[in-house]
Image (cartoon, grey):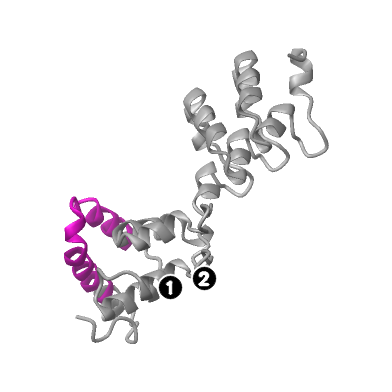
Amino acid sequence: MKSPNAMLEADEFGWIPLHYAAHFGHVEVVKLFLKENISLAYIGDRERMTTLHISAKEGHHVVIKTLIAECPDTCELLDNKYRTAVHYLINEQDKDGNTPFHLAAMKGHCELLIMLAYKYNRRIAWMALNKDGLSTVGIIQSVNKRLMSKEKTYFVSFLSNPFMDSDFIERLQSFMSLIAKEGEVIKAAKNLLRSLWKLGQDLKITDVGEGLL
């Protein structure tokens, strides 16, 4: 293992050796660095990206798991664009090109999609295509059988262009937290549509959701 000073030496990008180990997915090297100096995990580069940000961006799951196990609070660290490591993971694609949101849409977990849409909306690649050429919105339209056609249309409109209202978001999050069973998705969707329609009326959005209920 290098000297303590060498482990802290940063290059022109602000990267220390641990950052490179994480970038290339060398989990055993990452473990050695952390064993020598756990505080290395909290050091950010010039963009304030930590080792966890870097490993998440590269999709190195074993490194991510190691970092979270050793330094769980690094999950809360923000880069210079106010992103945690989770923001990099939400758009990660598997071997079939599916992001977590493709998979949620396939399983009909629309309540999860909506909650995450509000939390990460501007950072989610909603139109990212999997290897079948389908986006999350496309899956809702053509694959998901749990929503009736009119509800599908409204969910697509909602996910593609959600209107942001802080009070409504809080009510939506509270409402969605009460959903305990997958079989209640349709019931929840109908109640949600009523709430969204009322919000649309309050905002004088007369062409959104009309005729769905």
Secondary structure, mark 1, is helix
Where residue 174 appears, x then y in whole percent? 25, 53
Q: Residue furthest right?
A: 12
Where residue 45 appears, x then y in whole percent? 71, 37
Looking at the picture, which amino acid does disc 1 mark? Gly
Q: Quadrant of the C terminus?
A: bottom left
Disc 1 target residue:
138
Please say whether residue 172 is one of the residues in the magenta stretch.
yes
Decide which of tag 2 and tag 1 comes sooner along the chain.
2
100 shown above or below 17: below
Who's the residue at 48% across and 70% down the image?
Answer: 134
- Of the two numbered discs 2 and 1 in the rendering, the one whose residue sits closer to the viewer: 2
Asked if one can make out residue 142 in the rendered structure from this viewpoint, the answer is yes
Q: How many marks?
A: 2
Residue 190 in which image quadrant? bottom left
Asked if one can make out residue 161 in the rendered structure from this viewpoint, the answer is no
Q: CA distance from mark 2 to mark 1?
A: 9 Å
Who's the residue at 50% across and 59% down the image?
Answer: 124
Disc 2 target residue:
133
Where residue 128 appears, x then y in whole percent? 53, 65
Q: Which SS does the magenta portion mostly show?
A: helix
Q: Do the residues under discs 2 and 1 have CB atoms within 8 angstroms? A: yes
In magenta, the rendered stretch is: 168-197
Who's the residue at 83% across and 37% down the image?
Answer: 12
Which label is found at residue 156? none
Secondary structure, mark 2, is loop
Looking at the picture, which amino acid does disc 2 mark? Gly
Who's the residue at 35% across and 62% down the image?
Answer: 106
Q: Dot 1 surroundings within 10 Å: few (below 14), some, or many (20 or more)? A: some
